[in-house]
Each structure stands twice: as structure tokens, then as C-alpha cells.
């Protein structure tokens, strides 16, 4: 991604590890966030890769075709990517995972002015200047509170999300805790109790 011509950030579990400077758990793939307006640039950047896109606005059977970059994705969406040397058949049911060679997952996120749109409904935004920072590993990474908000806004609490929360929580500043507490109160998440002052 070093040659990608638009903003991007490592996110997901590897981003947690980038903040902590150590590997805390096993990871299935690498998650990277890019913005909806840059998806054409992403398609060009990944020339030759097999791309499987998932967009909640599409019909269910649309998830079983390769993304050719022409159909615009609506944030939030995501793209599973398989490197040219790992090319293969469409995964059964359009479900892509690392075992099938889909080692990268790109989150297509919204951007409104200089604010990263973390959630449309309820609306939660975060200033882009603070949302993406350089990690000790030398890559742009989503801020810890942004990472944890994404993990808290899922439909269920996954073990890996709980592990990431427990790993990042001790290093959060009072300001980060306060913002995260306020943001996840909108999605009514059990982590609220652990973020109380």
C-alpha cells in the first residue's frame, strides 16, 4: 500500500498490534480501510488481483461475482482480495476467507469533508486528522478509539474483539475513553461499563 495514491489505514486486529508494538493474537487476514471516493484508485492499484466485493445495498446474488471496479460500492462495504499468484475459483456462496487465499480485506468507508464517517445510523464521525496516525511500525493506522468503535458496532461480541478491547483499554487516555464511551453509548454496547470513569 505504500504506493497507493490516497489515504488509507491499517485497521482490525493487526492495527491493535501495531499500536501495542507486539503480536497479541493470531490473525486470519489483514484489514485496510480506504474511502469510498478512492475505490477506483484501489481497483487500479490491485490490478490482477481477484476482488470479491460485498455491499449491503446489492442483491444477495451480486456477492457471487468478481468485482470489476465499474460498479460503485456504497460505504460501508468491503472487498476481499486474493493476490494474482493465488487466483482460483469463486469461493462457495461468495464467502471469502484467508484459507482460500483472501489475505486482504478492504473496508470501504465514508468521508464527509475532513471527518471519517464511522457510522451512518446513528451518525458517528471522527476528525480524519486524528483518526489516522503513524504507528511505531511505520504504517498509517486507525486510532485506537476508532478501532474499538468499529469492533463495538458489530452485531455480536466476537472473542477476537474482546481480546483487542482488553489489549488496548489500559493504554487509552481519558479523552479516548470518553469519546469511545459516548460513541458506543449510541449502539448500546456492553463495554460501556468498563469505560465508566
Image (spheres, rainbow, N blue to C red):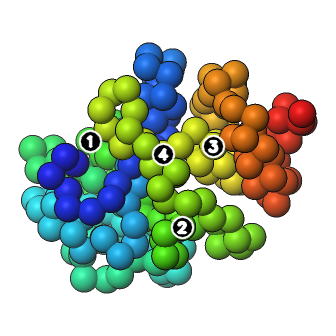
Identify residue for label 3: 145
Identify residue for label 1: 101
Q: Pointer 2 and pointer 4: residues touching (CB < 8 Å)?
A: no
Label 3 packing within 10 angstroms: few (<14), some (14-19), many (20+) = many
The location of residue 42, given as percent across then percent down, is: 24, 64
Q: Pointer 2 and pointer 3: residues touching (CB < 8 Å)?
A: no
Task: Look at the numbered disc 1 and give the secondary structure of its residue.
Answer: loop
- Mark 2 or 4: in front is 2
Identify residue for label 2: 115
Q: Pointer 1 and pointer 3: residues touching (CB < 8 Å)?
A: no
Q: State the image quarter where residue 197 is shown.
A: top right
Count of number-bearing discs: 4
120 relative position to 194: left or right: left
The location of residue 195, given as percent across then percent down, is: 83, 35
Q: State the image quarter where residue 40 is shown.
A: bottom left
Whether residue 140 is visible, yes or no, is yes
Q: In the rendered image of this protein, does residue 142 appear above or below residue 185?
A: above
Whether residue 118 is visible, yes or no, is no
Pick whichever of labels 1 and 4 is earlier in the sequence.
Answer: 1
Label 4 packing within 10 angstroms: few (<14), some (14-19), many (20+) = many
Label 2 packing within 10 angstroms: few (<14), some (14-19), many (20+) = some
Task: Look at the numbered disc 4 and give the secondary structure of its residue.
Answer: strand
- Mark 1 or 4: in front is 4
Q: Nearer the viewer, residue 56 or 110?
A: 110
Amino acid at each position: 500500500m505504500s504506493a497507493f495514491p490516497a489515504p488509507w489505514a491499517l485497521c482490525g486486529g493487526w492495527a491493535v498490534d501495531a499500536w501495542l508494538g507486539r503480536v497479541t493474537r493470531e490473525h486470519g487476514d489483514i484489514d485496510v480501510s480506504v474511502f469510498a471516493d478512492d475505490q477506483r484508485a484501489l481497483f487500479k492499484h490491485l490490478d490482477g488481483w481477484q476482488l470479491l466485493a460485498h455491499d449491503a445495498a446489492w442483491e444477495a446474488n451480486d456477492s457471487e461475482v468478481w468485482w470489476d471496479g465499474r460498479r460503485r460500492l456504497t460505504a460501508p462495504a468491503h472487498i476481499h482480495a486474493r493476490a494474482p499468484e493465488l487466483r482460483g475459483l469463486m469461493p462457495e456462496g461468495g464467502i471469502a476467507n484467508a484459507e482460500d487465499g483472501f489475505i486482504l480485506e478492504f473496508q470501504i468507508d465514508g468521508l464527509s469533508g475532513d471527518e471519517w464517517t464511522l457510522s451512518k445510523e446513528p451518525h458517528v464521525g471522527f476528525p480524519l486528522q486524528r483518526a489516522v496516525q503513524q504507528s511505531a511500525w511505520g504504517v498509517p493506522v486507525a486510532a485506537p478509539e476508532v478501532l474499538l468503535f468499529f469492533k463495538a458496532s458489530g452485531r455480536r461480541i466476537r472473542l477476537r474483539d474482546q481480546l483487542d478491547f482488553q489489549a488496548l483499554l489500559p493504554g487509552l487516555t481519558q479523552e479516548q475513553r470518553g469519546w469511545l464511551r459516548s460513541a458506543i453509548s449510541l449502539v448500546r454496547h456492553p463495554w460501556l461499563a468498563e469505560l465508566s470513569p
